Image (tube, helix red, strand yellow):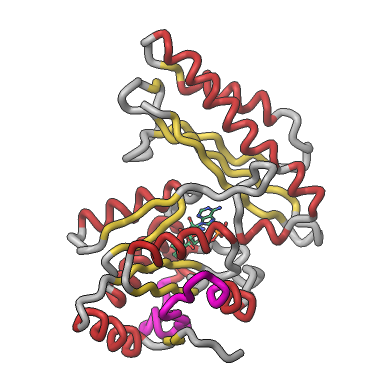
Amino acid sequence: MTTSIKILRTVGQVRAWQKQCFFNKETVGFVPTMGALHQGHTYLVNQSLKENDRTIVSIFVNPSQFAPHEDLDAYPRTIDHDLQALESLDRPVDALFLPKVSEMFPSGIVLDVAKQKGAFVNGVSTIVTKLLNVIQPTNAYFGQKDAQQCVVVKNLVKDLLIDTTIRVCPTLREPNGLAMSSRNAYLSQEAKDQCSIIYKGLCAGRDYYEEEIKSGKPVSAAAVADVIREVFSSMPKEWNLEYIAVSHPESLEDLNEIESGVGATVSTAVRVPKSDGSGTARLIDNVQLNG
Ligand SMILES: Nc1ncnc2c1ncn2[C@@H]1O[C@H](COP(=O)(O)OP(=O)(O)OP(=O)(O)O)[C@@H](O)[C@H]1O
Ligand SMILES: CC(C)(CO)[C@@H](O)C(=O)[O-]
Ligand code: BAL
């Protein structure tokens, strides 16, 4: 496909592009993705276009953040569609970084990491650090949908003294409330309709909290989770609720009580059978309880 977007495939090409921006005193916005772009992604890209002189997007399905037997091979790869989506914005992005695995992991991937607990956190921290090192953006854009990822990335930028501002954008949703996700492509329309129960449950938990906190006393995290579990009890029985977590909004440590002035992040993951029968799609979502 022909495109006006500069396609960069090597670290060397990105560094040369970045140096030119730096030389011109232009700010650089960066949106890391794994492709299969949807409106959640284009929201982040539009935000970057608004706030920076130049915008670069990366598409890299990062093997090091998939657990063994997860959907690395099946993960949707739709590069022609993605290029079209980036071309048809009000202003096209300036550059697209499309590295091969060998470019990002020249010494290979330590696959044992994927067997350890916390593989996702390690995998995301490593790839985001590498990408920020290569691109050295002024601002980098992430979606609130991946709440754990936002916390991990904010902490790593702080701890490693990386000179990039992390901008977190709200979760974009389908009209029925389902959070947009590349993995929704695994589901039939009927399943997507049923999936509205995920956000409904989270909202019921948030409504309960907002009512209870008016008393001025801390609210029990278990009680919030129970309200959500009650809504989730009408999920189809073949679905698998992995967890409901009520966590501190900054550290993501589990909370027993939610205090006003602090609030919480309430997150969940649900495995829903894929419509082609080839396994399950893991859907995640979260809401914020205001402090
Ligand atoms: N619905 C959404 N609203 C806002 N941002 C989103 C949304 N979905 C994804 N993003 C953000 O886009 C960036 C790239 O995410 P990614 O390419 O993994 O897409 P994804 O749809 O989250 O994929 P999947 O859900 O299959 O993991 C991340 O910062 C992610 O938080
Ligand atoms: C940030 C990211 C691109 C790192 O691979 C990925 O975790 C994602 O798409 O959210
Ligand atoms: N969007 C979060 C990264 C992942 O799906 O692995």
Q: Is residue 214 magenta?
A: no
Q: Is residue 133 left or right of residue 176?
A: left
Residue extending farthest to the front is 90
Secondary structure mostly seen in magenta is loop
x 74%, y 49%: residue: 192
Q: Quadrant of residue 55?
A: bottom left
Where residue 227 sits: x, y (%)?
60, 22
Of 257 and 95, nearer the camera is: 95
x 47%, y 84%: residue: 5
Q: Quadrant of residue 238?
A: top right
x 41%, y 8%: residue: 215
Q: Is residue 159 left or right of residue 53?
A: left
Q: Is residue 99 magenta?
A: yes
Where residue 81 sits: x, y (%)?
64, 76
Q: Please report the bounds of the magenta region as a residue range.
A: 86-110
Where 101 falls versus 283 (above or below)? Answer: below
Where 118 falls versus 252 (above or below)? Answer: below
Of 98 and 210, nearer the camera is: 210
Of 272 and 146, nearer the camera is: 146
Where residue 230 sits: x, y (%)?
66, 23
Where 264 falls versus 2 (above or below)? Answer: above
Where residue 170 sits: x, y (%)?
47, 47
Q: In this figure, what is the number of numbered marks?
A: 0
x 20%, y 55%: residue: 159
